[in-house]
Image (spheres, rainbow, N blue to C red):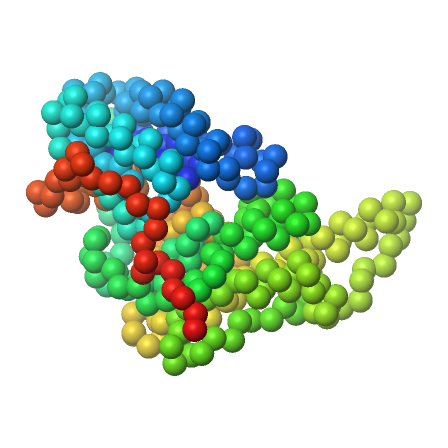
Amino acid sequence: MKVLGIESSCDECAAAVVEDGAWVLSNVVATQIPWHAAYNGVVPEIASRMHTEWIGGVVKEALDRAGIGPDGIDGVAATAHPGLLGSLLVGLNFAKAFAWAARIPFIAVDHMLAHLYAPRLSPAPSPGCQNPPGNTAPDYPFLGLLVSGGHSIICRADGFDDITVLGTTIDDAAGEAFDKVSKHYGFGYPGGAAIDRLAKDGDPAAFRFPLPSLRKGDHPYDVSYSGLKTAVINQLEQFRAKPRPAAAGGNAEATAGNSEAASIAASFQKTAVEILLRALFRAAEDTGISTVVSGGGVAANSLLRARLAEHQGLRCVFPPPELCGDNGAMVAGLGFQYLARGDRSPLSAAASARIKAFKRRYP
């Protein structure tokens, strides 16, 4: 079964064709980063308008790369929630219209469940390949670590559509904190990638930023980024652990400034990752589950990957970097599982910006 997946929950206009929920025949992602970079963040009105302009061309390119026409698609899946409502509506309604016109089944899927499905996808084997690679996806149950600009979720997954949220953010998401710190210091946009690059040249021990202290009885696996963000932006000098780097050489001021910026980035990134891992490791210990699947844009962070890889007691599974961010392949793969089970969504299916379980109130 070949499924067309459409993803438009934020600022990536994406479409893909996936066969049998496993083989990626095409995966097209049109990024809006240059249009939002001037604002150091996604502008919802710009995002939805650009999705409207691009969606037809992106879907056509996905079909062309897969080498099939609309009549070769057996089903259509689209993200319905969570995300920016205006953006969601563009992809969702296009998918409905495509399914109606082609007289094929349509399914609306959850964006975060799709991120958890991403590691189960593989590139399509080349024609004539006698021994295609096997599926190395983890067995259920496993712990999910979903980290992006809008969400930070630790969950238990017992099936492709059966998750229990164990912990989530009580304020900012991890990716949101990266973006806001990067915007304040002018590190670049998107903030996560900019800080990750800059941190490689910095001293992660230059600043000792605080970890949040939540009431453990009520929030054992929840995370918080508001305090870290405030410390980095408004209280930097209070947490300096090492003297400011001395200027030296002909371009002394620039040298010191570059070193300082890199150390701010490295120290912030170290603490941001530690906040996630502290809650995740606690959940692994309490549940006895030793497999972790990570997804979302922040899952591409090099420090997060390194720290999880070095943990001896856990098997950590990441999608390839191109499937960490928003993409249509994960939507198509998840959609196949629903369609194969016989599920269908009505053409009246609505988009929803939020899911209550994905963010908690505190206290």
Q: Mark yes or no: residue 173 visible.
A: yes
The residue located at (85%, 59%) in the rendering is 246
**Residue 105 located left or right of residue 81:** left
Q: Please, is residue 90 above or below residue 238 in the view?
A: above
**Residue 200 located left or right of residue 48:** right
Q: From the top left corner, tell me how far across and down residue 331 is, in percent.
A: 28, 40
**Residue 41 located left or right of residue 359:** right
The answer to which image quadrant residue 144 occupies is: bottom left
Q: Mark yes or no: residue 310 visible.
A: no
| Residue closest to the eye, 198 or 363 | 363
The residue located at (72%, 53%) in the rendering is 261
Q: Please, is residue 185 above or below residue 102 in the view?
A: below
Q: From the top left corner, tell me how far across and down residue 218 is, in percent.
A: 38, 77
Q: In which quarter of the image is the N terminus?
A: top left
The residue located at (16%, 21%) in the rendering is 101
Q: Quadrant of the C terminus?
A: bottom left
The answer to which image quadrant residue 128 occupies is: top left
Q: Please, is residue 270 above or below residue 282 in the view?
A: above
Residue situated furthest left in the rendering: 342
| Residue closest to the eye, 238 or 256 | 238
